[in-house]
């Protein structure tokens, strides 16, 4: 599921349900028997066995890049939030309700959007047109921090990875219209995407009334391509030791000459920063030269296009169509855009998510669901604690630290105790692009003001109506929003084995992020500190190397293999999480034998529920995009990669040599077994 590391909130459970409601048939105890494909042996492919019949029936809607259980819940919640918004429109007593309704209205009022045209961006575009030097262009990039416009560098504020009780400013690479791999990749897919992207840039210039659109778009693409070749890879950016480079702001001139740092920090509204983290110092060192040597006209076109791209989805129909033709059709493989009301709901969720969340939980989150979720979390943490003691490979010193970290875990379930205040956020019912800019600035300024304030450990990085979950190492917390604690992931009425195989594995996954390749470098107080003995660290790296090799062999789309290094943290969490969920299930049974239901033992239902929880069907273009940019393995490969490492799966289904799911014992990954 989603996780924070350190504050880039990381499973992307998004899109919408493909088929009719009757296809979601989980019966009385939580297993969809009609979705099973009995022509496939579970010993050969658990994902196709558990979901094959459903996959044959399911159709991905034209507006979507994928479909599945997560998408069903996403769609359900969109409907619920739409009802909340419509009710808010009639609530004159609540200022927040009025803002929710006005934000939604601003997206739905296409006549007002068409009438405004490019007027909401005119001041920005005129300011860009007036730039006369590279230095002025860089200063303007700093001024854009807090706006929804990408520039070659991005400022942020998060907890200091080595001092979680304080906030720290940071600078990271940014400024590309596609993921870096699309610029560097040699496959035909990437080459086609590059050509389509240049056409898209030219289209934006044409819509803005600019001349020589093709040649100018080509020059901007060449600049972005140069930036991409200077930037760090997604795998390199997962190395939290290499991306931690804290320096005094006063020393930046020596460390990274060529920048007007006082001016940049002032323009970025971060003059209060005394220290700053440089995520990719080698990139920042090269960037000043690249920008200073670029023609000013190209820098101006680059900033113009970054601005037009950022707002295209919020302008008139031709702009929306151009944006969708590239990002929707080319990169996601969709043939139709989402209905406008769904996009409006998404904006309200993003812009005023906790205001909506407060209304959502009051209507849809039951005390019984929270009580049972609390019990599941307690049993998972108990299973982890017991597992630490049984590990033969872990030395006593490391075990003590692991116990201490686990004891300090903070579970957050359902919704926050303290809600965000949107009083200072200005929303206008007739200014969509302006609302988008003001929301972005509101959130950025909120972060910037934190630099000299105590860390707020009560806040959430996800709204209650989000179908997801995450682990945040800086707070050593696991967070489960209300929306994921519902059927078919979880239901108080479901069989115990099903709940533990589905939501239990998700809870175990998030707990496990505290001990994955990144999380195990943080202690119980959320500080990046090495608490492993050299021997244990060596064993950890040797064991997790098995996962890199296993997952790199998966080829979801021909010519595109899973990146075992990029997905390592999520794969560790999947495997360790299922191990612990299984142990917690045994704890929950209390020594009793699980009943046989529909001819299936408790263990069989546990693994089948796990496989069905990853039910998904995706377009190839979207899968390729995920492979290059997302640290999660594509959904249908997650059960395959996980259960093939877990011994009880072999026992439950009689998996033996010759079966396609079989791995020799020496090749299986075990961390907590």
Image (cartoon, grey):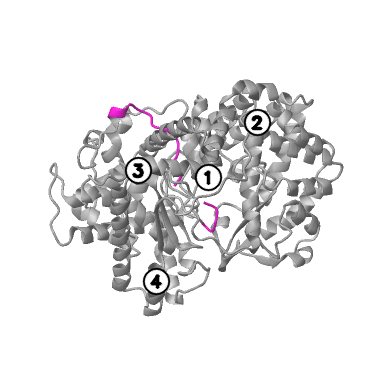
Residue 226 appears left or right of 599: right
Q: State how far apart marks 1 and 2 are (Cα).
A: 36 Å
Marks 1 and 4, the one that precedes in the sequence: 4
Q: Which residue is mark 3?
A: 614
Q: Which residue is mark 2?
A: 431
Residue 402 image label: 4
Which mark is in front, 4 or 3? 4
| Identity of the residue furthest to the right in this view | 132
Q: State how far apart marks 4 and 3 are (Cα).
A: 30 Å
What secondary structure prevails in the magenta region? loop
Density class for disc 4 (Cα within 10 Å; few <14, some 14-19, many ≥20) is: many
Residue at position x 45%, y 69% in the image? 524
Q: Nearer the viewer, residue 417 or 235?
A: 417
Which mark is in front, 4 or 2? 2
Residue 164 image position (x, y, % from top left): 55, 66
Q: Secondary structure at mark 4?
A: helix
Determine the image quadrant of residue 465: top left
Which mark is in front, 3 or 1? 3
């Amino acid at each position: 599921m989603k996780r924070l590391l350190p504050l880039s909130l990381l499973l992307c459970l998004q899109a919408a349900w493909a088929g009719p409601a009757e296809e979601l048939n989980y019966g009385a105890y939580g297993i969809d028997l009609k979705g099973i494909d009995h022509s496939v042996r579970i010993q050969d492919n658990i994902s196709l066995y558990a979901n094959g019949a459903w996959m044959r029936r399911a159709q991905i809607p034209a507006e979507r890049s994928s479909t599945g259980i997560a998408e069903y819940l996403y769609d359900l919640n969109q409907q619920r939030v739409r009802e909340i918004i419509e009710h808010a429109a009639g609530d004159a007593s609540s200022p927040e309700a009025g803002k929710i309704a006005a934000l939604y209205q601003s997206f739905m009022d296409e006549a007002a959007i068409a009438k405004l045209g490019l007027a909401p961006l005119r001041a920005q575009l005129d300011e860009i047109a007036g730039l006369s030097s590279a230095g002025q262009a860089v200063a303007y990039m700093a001024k854009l921090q807090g706006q929804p416009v990408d520039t070659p560098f991005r400022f942020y504020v998060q907890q200091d990875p080595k001092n979680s009780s304080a906030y720290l400013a940071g600078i990271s690479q940014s400024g590309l219209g596609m993921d870096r791999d699309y610029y560097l990749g040699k496959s035909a897919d990437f080459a086609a995407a590059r050509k389509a992207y240049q056409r898209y840039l030219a289209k934006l210039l044409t819509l803005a009334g600019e001349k020589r659109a093709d040649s100018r778009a080509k020059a901007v693409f060449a600049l972005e391509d140069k930036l991409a070749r200077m930037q760090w890879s997604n795998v390199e950016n997962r190395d939290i030791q290499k991306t931690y480079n804290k320096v005094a702001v006063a020393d930046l001139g020596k460390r990274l000459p060529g920048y007007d740092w006082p001016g940049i920090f002032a323009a970025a509204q971060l003059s209060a920063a005394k220290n700053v983290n440089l995520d990719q110092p080698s990139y920042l060192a090269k960037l000043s030269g690249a920008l200073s040597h670029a023609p000013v006209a190209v820098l101006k076109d680059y900033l113009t296009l970054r601005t037009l791209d950022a707002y295209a989805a919020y302008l008139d129909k031709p702009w929306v169509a151009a944006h969708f033709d590239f990002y929707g059709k080319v990169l996601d493989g969709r043939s139709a855009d989402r209905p406008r009301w769904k996009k409006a709901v998404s904006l309200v969720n993003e812009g005023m998510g906790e205001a909506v969340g407060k209304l959502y939980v009051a209507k849809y989150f039951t005390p019984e669901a929270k009580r049972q979720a609390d019990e599941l979390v307690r049993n998972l943490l108990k299973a982890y604690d017991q597992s630490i003691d049984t590990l033969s490979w872990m030395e006593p010193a490391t075990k003590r630290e692991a116990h201490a970290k686990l004891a300090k875990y903070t579970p957050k379930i359902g919704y926050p105790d303290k809600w965000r205040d949107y009083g200072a956020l200005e929303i206008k019912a007739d200014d969509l692009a302006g609302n988008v800019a003001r929301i972005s600035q509101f959130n950025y300024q909120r972060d910037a003001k934190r630099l000299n304030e105590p860390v707020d450990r009560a806040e959430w990085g996800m709204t209650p109506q989000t179908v997801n979950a995450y682990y945040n190492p800086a707070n050593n917390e696991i967070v489960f929003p209300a929306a994921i604690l519902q059927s078919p992931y979880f239901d108080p009425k479901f069989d115990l084995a099903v709940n533990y195989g589905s939501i239990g594995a998700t809870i175990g996954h998030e707990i496990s992020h505290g001990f994955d390749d990144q999380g195990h470098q943080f202690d119980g107080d959320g500080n990046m500190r090495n608490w492993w003995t050299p021997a244990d660290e060596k064993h950890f790296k040797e064991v997790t190397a098995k996962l890199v090799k296993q997952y790199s062999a998966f080829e979801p789309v021909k010519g595109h293999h899973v990146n075992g290094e990029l997905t390592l943290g999520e794969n560790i969490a999947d495997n360790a999480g299922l191990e612990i969920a299984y142990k917690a299930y045994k704890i929950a049974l209390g020594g009793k034998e699980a009943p046989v239901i529909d001819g299936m033992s408790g263990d069989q239902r546990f693994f089948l529920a796990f496989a069905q929880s990853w039910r998904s069907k995706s377009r190839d273009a979207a899968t390729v995009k995920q492979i290059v940019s997302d640290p999660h393995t594509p959904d249908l490969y997650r059960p395959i990669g996980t259960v093939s490492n877990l011994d009880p799966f072999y026992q439950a289904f009689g998996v033996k040599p010759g079966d396609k799911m079989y791995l020799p014992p020496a090749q299986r990954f075990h961390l907590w077994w």
